[in-house]
Image: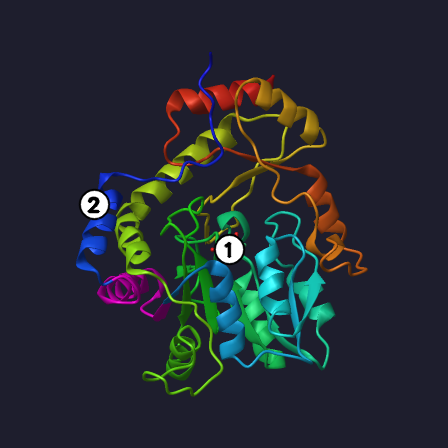
């Protein structure tokens, strides 16, 4: 039997297990010293901005929007070609998600389409650094500044990515990261909100803990968005390996891009550092190719088969040509750090066949 090659491989090593046991034995389980240390260490990745650890990437996005006062009557522009959480985070504030088309090369929010979608009700834009490639932040932040809009980066897939020397998560008014097990680093579950604004950071800290500046004093209508110390301890261990994992993802991607033929491989724009959360090719024969790879015991993914604007949850009429084409053609190949050279050779051979 050929060994299956999986699309993702969440890392759980002895160091993660030891950290979990250590925290459990300490009996300091939630939002304690491990969370504070995780926030301080994560700040190194995002130009020293304030970091607020929360229970998921979804709540990170939602609290970022709330902290900027986004709510009923507001419109928020985002791509339709993304994970559902990006839009759900908007919808739960009471604001209306407005779906704009993507750049066909990078799969990220198209600045021209974004400009065309701006109305007098637009309050924010959410560029998604999809698959780990940074969105066109130079043009998007300029556009937002011109119209007085908040920029909330969805950096859930982009820890380690950068554009023009600036890290993903350090461009916008705020950014959200995810530590779900399949992401480039995990914390079992978890998220991080990042902002450069002191007041916003304070509001985020209140919102994640029932709006309480001190016990049983309610300054805001808050949530329970707290991270456990168990999760933070795992995140801290993973943070130490993240740089070497990112290098491995990039090396695997370089091999695939050099050796794959007959499919469109993912470009990296000049000035961009791709974190390769996913390695996404395009093919007119996507479904046949996927079948062929499955027969060779190679797991692939379709990120994402149905654009959000056409999902039953949203059902918005929109004509998003590049989004539709991407949904029909994309195929994610394994690129994770645990792949071996022979795994990569098997992937290349199977795609060529
Ligand atoms: C994973 C992900 C999220 C949500 O993160 P969770 O930690 O699963 O809540 C949001 N946006 C994108 C683009 C994601 O990939």
In this picture, is 134 found above or below 150?
above
| Foreground of the two, 314 or 104 | 314
In this picture, is 233 found above or below 226?
above
**Residue labelled with disc 1:** 134
**Which disc, if any, is residue 160?**
none
In this picture, is 182 found above or below 110?
above
Quarter placement of the C terminus: top right
Helix or strand or loop: what does disc 2 sit on?
Answer: helix
309 relative to 12 in the view: left or right: right
Helix or strand or loop: what does disc 1 sit on?
Answer: loop
**Residue labelled with disc 2:** 18
Q: Is residue 47 magenta?
A: yes
Q: Please name the residue shown 39% across and 77% down the image.
A: 201
Q: Please name the residue shown 41% across and 40% down the image.
A: 250
Cα–Cα span, label 2 and label 1:
34 Å
Residue found farthest to the top: 1
* Residue extent of the magenta highlight: 29-52
Q: Is residue 315 magenta?
A: no
Image color mode: rainbow
User: Which badge, 2 or 1, is on the more N-terminal residue?
Assistant: 2
Q: Where is residue 249 shown, x and y percent of the image?
A: 40, 39
Q: Where is residue 130 shown, x and y percent of the image?
A: 55, 51
Q: Where is residue 266 shown, x and y percent of the image?
A: 56, 40
| Foreground of the two, 206 or 105 | 206
């Amino acid at each position: 039997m050929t060994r299956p090659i999986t699309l993702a491989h969440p890392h759980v090593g002895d160091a993660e297990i030891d950290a979990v046991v250590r925290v459990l034995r300490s009996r300091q389980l939630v939002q304690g010293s491990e969370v504070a240390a995780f926030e301080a260490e994560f700040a190194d990745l995002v130009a020293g901005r304030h970091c607020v650890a929360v229970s998921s990437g979804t709540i990170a996005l939602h609290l970022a929007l709330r902290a900027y006062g986004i709510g009923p009557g507001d419109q928020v522009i985002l791509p339709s070609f993304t994970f559902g959480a990006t839009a759900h985070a908007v919808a739960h504030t009471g604001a209306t998600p407005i779906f704009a088309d993507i750049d066909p090369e990078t799969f990220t929010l198209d600045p021209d389409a974004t400009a065309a979608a701006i109305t007098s009700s637009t309050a924010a834009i959410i560029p998604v650094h999809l698959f780990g490639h940074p969105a066109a932040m130079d043009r998007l932040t300029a556009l937002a500044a011109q119209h007085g809009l908040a920029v909330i980066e969805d950096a859930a897939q982009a820890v380690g990515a950068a554009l023009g020397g600036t890290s993903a998560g350090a461009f916008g008014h705020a950014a959200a990261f995810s530590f779900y097990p399949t992401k480039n680093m995990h914390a079992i579950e978890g998220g991080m909100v990042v902002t450069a604004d002191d007041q916003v950071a304070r509001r985020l800290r209140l919102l994640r803990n029932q709006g309480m500046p001190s016990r049983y004093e309610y300054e805001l209508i808050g949530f329970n968005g707290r991270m456990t110390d168990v999760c933070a301890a795992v995140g801290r261990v993973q943070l130490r390996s993240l740089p070497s994992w990112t290098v491995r993802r990039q090396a695997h991607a370089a091999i695939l891009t050099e050796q794959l033929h007959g499919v469109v491989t993912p470009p990296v724009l000049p000035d961009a550092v791709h974190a390769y959360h996913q390695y996404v090719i395009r093919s007119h024969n996507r479904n046949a190719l996927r079948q062929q790879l499955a027969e060779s015991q190679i797991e692939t993914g379709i990120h994402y088969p149905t654009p959000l604007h056409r999902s039953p949850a949203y059902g918005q009429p929109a004509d998003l040509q590049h989004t539709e084409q991407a949904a029909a053609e994309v195929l994610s190949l394994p690129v994770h750090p645990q792949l071996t050279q022979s795994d990569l050779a098997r992937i290349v051979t199977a795609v060529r066949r």
